[in-house]
Image (cartoon, rainbow, N blue to C red):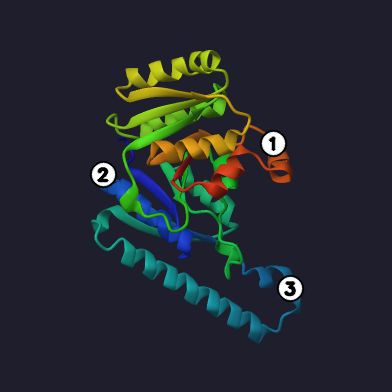
């Protein structure tokens, strides 16, 4: 495992806490550094109505914002207290949450984060996994809210369609995971064609020392099949290429990546 520098998007919410717990588990395996980052801009109300809000009210909003950020820092410190202090870091940075997280991610092996919370009290502190995965150039591990790391195991399901993003996901798996990891390659379509498509991935993974096998399934319900296979094989991580289609199409019509992120029960490693 070559993970030595993990960035965690941490705003103190329940999804962020699940992500941090997962990052701690990964870091413990390889003596990696963990850096929590709280990226935030102005509170939304100040951004939208700042010119029309009395100064006293603005001061009160800013004080509440500052107090919450300090609570987030304390939560991070408490959750990482058992780790060597020299390998734990925290950043409180100003700026649009997605943009700042992506900028900082350039100096890390991977980003670990949760899905955004609905109806968050601090939406200006919410980074979005779809944006970060699409634009950061880094693998993003999205951990479901409430995920119990005790159920994590050293197996991976790699969704393989033979395209560029899937190849990137495979490369990230090779870089980030131990060669003792068992990897199941899921290829969809007619059995013969699907197996033939996945064989180069199998060969590549085996040459890197991984135990690898193919599962082929004929289906048109791609997201549903990926999720069902992840459940059937009881994998620890679902790895997949993310967002092969334009963002507008994904947003308007949904897509495999969005559906998997919404419904996955295990951490999803996204590569783009």
Q: Please state which of residues 101 and 266 is positioned toward the viewer in this rendering.
A: 266
Q: Please state which of residues 98 and 173 is positioned toward the viewer in this rendering.
A: 173
Relative to 41, residue 231 above or below: above
Residue corresponding to mark 1: 246
Which quarter of the figure has residue 207?
Answer: top left
Q: Earlier in the sequence, mark 3 or mark 1?
A: 3
- Say which element carries label 1: loop
Q: CA distance from mark 1 to mark 2?
A: 36 Å
* 182 horizontally vs 116: left or right: left
- Say which element carries label 2: helix
Q: Residue at x 60, y 57 (%)?
A: 96
Callout 3 environment at 10 Å: few (<14), some (14 to 19), or many (20+)? few
Callout 1 environment at 10 Å: few (<14), some (14 to 19), or many (20+)? few
Q: Nearer the viewer, mark 3 or mark 2?
A: 2
Residue corresponding to mark 3: 49
- Outermost residue toward the right in this view: 52
Whether residue 83 is visible here, answered yes or no, is yes
Residue corresponding to mark 2: 29
Callout 2 environment at 10 Å: few (<14), some (14 to 19), or many (20+)? few
Q: Please state which of residues 262 and 18 is positioned toward the viewer in this rendering.
A: 262
Which quarter of the figure has residue 37?
Answer: bottom left
* 181 horizontally vs 93: left or right: left
């Amino acid at each position: 495992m070559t993970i030595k520098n993990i960035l965690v998007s941490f705003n103190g919410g329940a999804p962020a806490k699940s992500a941090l717990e997962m990052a701690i588990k990964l870091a413990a395996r390889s003596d990696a550094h963990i850096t929590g980052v709280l990226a935030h801009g102005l509170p939304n109300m100040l951004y939208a109505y700042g010119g029309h809000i009395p100064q006293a009210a603005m001061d009160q909003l800013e004080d509440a914002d500052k107090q919450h950020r300090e609570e987030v820092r304390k939560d991070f410190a408490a959750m990482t207290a058992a780790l060597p202090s020299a390998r734990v870091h925290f950043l409180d940075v100003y700026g649009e949450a997605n943009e700042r997280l992506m900028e900082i991610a350039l100096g890390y092996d991977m980003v670990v984060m949760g899905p955004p919370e609905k109806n968050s009290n601090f939406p200006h502190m919410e980074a979005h996994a779809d944006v970060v995965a699409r634009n950061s150039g880094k693998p993003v591990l999205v951990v479901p809210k409430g995920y119990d790391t005790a159920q994590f195991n050293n197996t991976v399901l790699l969704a393989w369609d033979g395209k560029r993003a899937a190849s990137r996901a495979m490369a990230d798996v090779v870089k980030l995971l131990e060669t003792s990891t068992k990897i199941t390659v899921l290829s969809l379509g007619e059995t013969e064609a699907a197996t033939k498509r996945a064989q180069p991935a199998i060969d590549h993974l085996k040459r890197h020392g991984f135990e690898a096998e193919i599962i082929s399934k004929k289906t048109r319900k791609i997201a549903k099949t990926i999720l069902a296979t992840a459940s059937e094989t009881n994998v620890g991580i679902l790895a997949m290429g993310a967002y092969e289609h334009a963002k507008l199409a994904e947003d308007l019509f949904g897509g495999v990546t969005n559906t998997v992120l919404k419904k996955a029960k295990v951490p999803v490693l996204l590569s783009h």
